[in-house]
Image: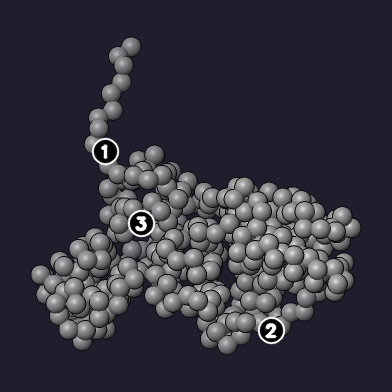
Amino acid sequence: MAKTPSWSSSPLPERLREGRRIRGITQNELADQLDISKQAVSQYEIGSNSPKPEIFEKICKILDLPYGYFFKPMPYTSTTPIFFRKCKTATKRDFEIFEGKVGWVREIYHYLQQFIEFPEVKILTKVSEKYSFEDVQLAAAELRKYWGLGLGPISNMTLLLENNGFVVAKVNVGAKKVDACSVLATGVNIKRPIIFLTPDTSAVRSRRDAAHELAHHVLHSWVDKEYFEANRERMDEEAEWFASSFLMPAESIRREAFSVSSLESIILLKKRWKVSAQSLLHYMYQLGVMNDNQFSYLRNKMYTRGWRRAEPLDDEIEQEEPLMLKQACELIIENNIKSRNQFIDDISFPRQDIEALCNLERNYLLETGVPKLKIVK
């Protein structure tokens, strides 16, 4: 079991900063609610001053965070990049909330892995500064073969990732403008990919997001933060190529493309492959099984029908739910390794946040205190 860092005797600056950001509050807004200056809040967050007890009590209440959270050291230091996709309409506040919750999931995983043996990570990785479309197709085909997928549709992308050692979590930011992301969690005897999806999207979009993030761990696991920031656009394009190739093997799509002559025929393929109609259309064009006129005609028909915003079957294809973190939490509780209250105290996040990030039933971690009675035989 990894050694737990000793807790601080005063509120940690990095926790004060993280807690504020994860609640979507600016320094000015927090200062106004505390009736202090922005400079005072900034001093708390850089560690040049600590809040007085009465101010700290107000901070806990405003941010709705437990007292212990602010004294708990970060269990890891991050040197690997978070594979975020740039989204022009997302605000800095959206990203800060999402990034904070990403950190919380990493902390929960670091805690759980002390008690739970997670599945072995099975992945094939590549090392190259630049990939061609053909390189990416080959990498996707190799991984499908390694995971024994054949050439048919993937029934559940989330379960596939979890069975091969990936941690998957759905992170609700309250904004539809933030895309999925992923990170390689590292530490003592730890090297595990964690993929973060957003719940406010269609099932087909979520599956593609998962495949896109998988691509980064296959193609770009070797990069550092600086390299990713400098080459993000190209690497995201490579990840998009991989997502299409992994979800829709070229050999199968070439074989089935002969039936595509209308939007209705594309929708039939969407139902079979659980991918968006737009991604199918663009991928068939990219594979050369559709000429310029066919592509333009069908794309324009899609735009006319408003499919850029929502497509048929978006509400009918079932959402995939991550299970691994949920099962790990339940194993610890149901086997009395930790009581519900101990579990929450150890992690030091609000109960509702832990339940949401781990996909637990609402109020699962609520200690009822109801005695368990048995029938006398």
Q: Which residue is mark 3?
A: 353
Q: Are marks 2 and 1 in contact (CB under 8 Å)?
A: no
Check disc 2 and give the amino acid type. Glu
Residue at screen point 25% across, 32% down: 370
Q: Which element is circle 3 on?
A: helix
Q: Quadrant of residue 369?
A: top left
x then y, percent, for residue 233: 62, 82
Which sits earlier in the primary sequence, circle 3 or circle 2?
2
Which sits earlier in the primary sequence, circle 2 or circle 1?
2
Q: Comparing marks 3 and 2, which lies closer to the viewer?
A: 3
Residue at screen point 39% across, 75% down: 93
Q: Residue furthest front?
A: 304
State how far apart marks 1 and 3 are (Cα): 18 Å
Q: Residues within 10 Å of mark 2 (few under 14, many from 20)?
A: few
Q: Comparing marks 2 and 1, which lies closer to the viewer?
A: 1
Determine if residue 165 is in view.
no
Q: Quadrant of residue 307?
A: bottom right
Residue nearest the observer in this picture, 66 or 296: 296
Check disc 1 and give the amino acid type. Thr
Q: Which mark is residue 129?
A: 2
Q: Is residue 236 above or below residue 274?
A: below
Q: Which residue is mark 1?
A: 368
Q: Are marks 1 and 3 in contact (CB under 8 Å)?
A: no
